[in-house]
Amino acid sequence: MYLESGDFRTRPLISDFTHNTSTTFVKANGNVSIFANNGFVELNKSKYCGKLILVPKEDNKFSVLEEIGIEEYLPGVIEGEMPLMWNDDALQAQAIAVRTYAIYKRKINVNALYHINKLDLAYNGSYMNQAKTKKIVGNTRGTVMVYDWKLFPGYFHSTCGGHTEDINLVFNLKTIPPLRGVDCGYCYDSKYYHWMKKLGKNEIQIKLNANKSNVKKISNITTERIGPGGHCSTLKIDHAGGTERVNANDFRLIIGPNNLRSTSFSIKETGNSFIFEGSGWGHGVGLCQYGTQKMAKSGFRWYDILRHYYPEIDLVKIY
């Protein structure tokens, strides 16, 4: 197991850089470390008080990493992932899912440049986090989920649409009981429970080809391999140049997650467009956030919620 102290490294997304205090720059081994002295450094409107590391890249650009302890990292993720007005038990369940996921990622990426980035988890930064968030994290300090006494990726998402999905179908990872998918029945209040989106064939073609596909005029799109949660694994795209199959979750991200909220959808052709009618928001694996809030409001405790969405887990305190 990995403790919260040490060089946990996260990669913020960067375009703008400002600071509000005296800042110390230290260069070592080609990298530049930035220490905000009793203040913060701001990147893309998020504020950081941890150690920032600028790592040069071959294209005369650089990657920006934050080095921070796990427990100091978690409040910024909770604030990015879940409304703070939600029930404390929902927030505590979220905190443990995030901690489990983050420490798992640190373990498998131990020799990588960074362990996790903002594409993995929403992160609002480490400066001036809310007192409520710090309390939620403190109440669960060191607590993680394990299956067969091993950490696993504690995936979560906004809205499952009625049933969470098998990790193998979405991410092509080995199915384990905590991530095989369960009936939810609690997220029906989410505005993303049902959705519909109309997309032009040409728009889809352009976006696919911008991501290394070679799709010509599209004639049809069909779903393949539907999981117990209703999510499809693969899309079959018939076009003038032949047939191409793409991972459904990759397709969703290419088209845009605000266009296709999930991979649980049906497709209807209408002229030069397709109508996608679906349910849920996100990949559908693991904890359903809207379902978590409904369970908490109904009187379920954080440990009940976690054992519902991640069957057969043990909850252990590792520090």
Image (cartoon, helix red, strand yellow):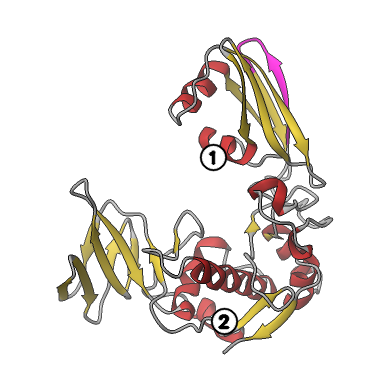
Relative horizontal placement of residue 106, taking residue 286 as reference (left or right): left
Residue that mark 2 sits on: 1
Q: How many marks?
A: 2
- Which quadrant is the N terminus positioned in? bottom right
Relative horizontal placement of residue 82, taking residue 65 as reference (left or right): right
Q: Return the residue nearer the eye: 55 or 46.
A: 55
**Residue at (67% x, 72% y) in the render:** 93
Q: Return the residue nearer the eye: 83 or 144.
A: 144
Relative horizontal placement of residue 37, taking residue 115 as reference (left or right): left
Which region shows up in magenta? 265-273
| Image quadrant assignment for residue 140 | bottom right
Q: Return the residue nearer the eye: 224 or 19.
A: 224
- Residue type for callout 2: Met
Q: Position of residue 154 (x, y in %)?
A: 64, 65
Q: Secondary structure at mark 1?
A: helix
* Of the image marks 2 and 1, the number of the one nearer the N terminus: 2
**Residue at (25% x, 61% y) in the render:** 55
Spatial separation of the CA atoms under disc 2 and disc 1 = 32 Å
